[in-house]
Amino acid sequence: MKIFIHFNTGSESLHKTLKIGLPKKWLKKPPTPILPLFIESYNKGREEGEFLKVEDCGMCDGEGRVFDCGEGGFTVEEVMENQDDVYVTPISEIDEGKGFVQKKVKVTPPSAPTPMEITPIPQKNPAEKAGHPSHYLRCIHLGCQKFFDPLEPPKCVHHVKPPVFHETAKWWSCCPGKKAYDWEGFQTVPGCTESICTNVREEGGAKVGEFMGGVELRGGDSGDKLMDAKGFNDRELARDRLKQVGDLVKEQWCDVDEASWEQLLGQMKGVGDGSEEEKKLREIGAVIKAAIKGKIVEGMRIS
């Protein structure tokens, strides 16, 4: 739901109109947060003597009736409709005789008759639906999204960082000082970077979901995946067993060079890749194998 909030009291320089898109969760509650939101926007850039205060103002409809913002009053969807005009008025100028805004009676339109025959409509690509030739492409730059001729791509003024949507406020991360409170106003925020329209994402760029000139902030995470608990436990168990074998070889079976054994343990991950590291590793393994074999032969002779 979108509404227009006006302040028309005093000289023309003090007047202001703000179009606000209300979040869905506000529709089921009294219109309490609307007035503070307007006054916050109104006071920006004004001198202190021109400031409005929430406690000094009320909201009325076009006939001067007051919107009840107290708990237990009518909800936004019960007293307001899309494109309604709301007037912020000093309490001293409100006519109490007008009373409060009452719940609106909504009339359900009759359902349309079911057509006897449906004629299939030829499908068009996005460019054709927007009134462009079929070979036109859509620019992927943030805040642009315009269709263009790929043979003659035009200049493109766009944003370099994704949008932020918080409650009713909307702004681009690269332009935090330019906020809008409705979707149409957000789309008119000028870009901060100039380049050429394109439909090809830069190599190495994050793969993120696009929607209406913005990006889906939850997507595009290309970081390394974490090892699960089972994989971690299996890896640690293998390391412990390898260490036990090393201790047995070094302390009981034979006099293997300790540096060679430690180097073997530290480079196990290199086996199988055909690299110079693998060759060195196999040479170390051969030294250990020969030492173990010698001890076994010596033991057989003694027995």
Image: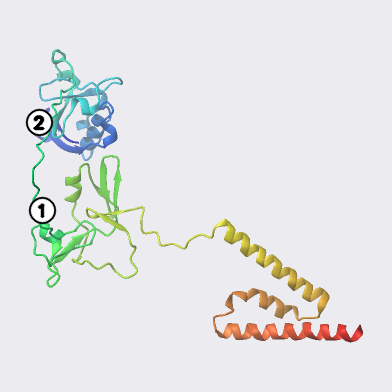
Q: Give left or right: position of 125 versus 221.
A: left
Q: Position of residue 170 (x, y in %)?
A: 26, 46
**Nearer the observer, 224 or 166:** 224
Q: Is residue 217 left or right of residue 79?
A: right
Direction front: furthest residue:
116
Q: Residue at x 67, y 78 (%)?
A: 263
**193 above or below 38?**
below
Residue 29 placement (x, y as % from top left): 28, 27
What kind of residue is marked 2? Answer: Ser
Image quarter of residue 248: bottom right
Please give the label number shown on residue 11. 2
* Residue labelled with disc 1: 120
Q: Would you say the residues marked 2 and 1 are in contact, meaning their CB atoms lie under 8 Å apart?
A: no
State which quarter of the image contains the N terminus.
top left
Against 3, is 136 above or below?
Answer: below
Q: Position of residue 154 (x, y in %)?
A: 13, 67
- Mark sitting earlier along the chain (2/1): 2
For the residues labelled 2 and 1, the Cα–Cα distance comes to 58 Å
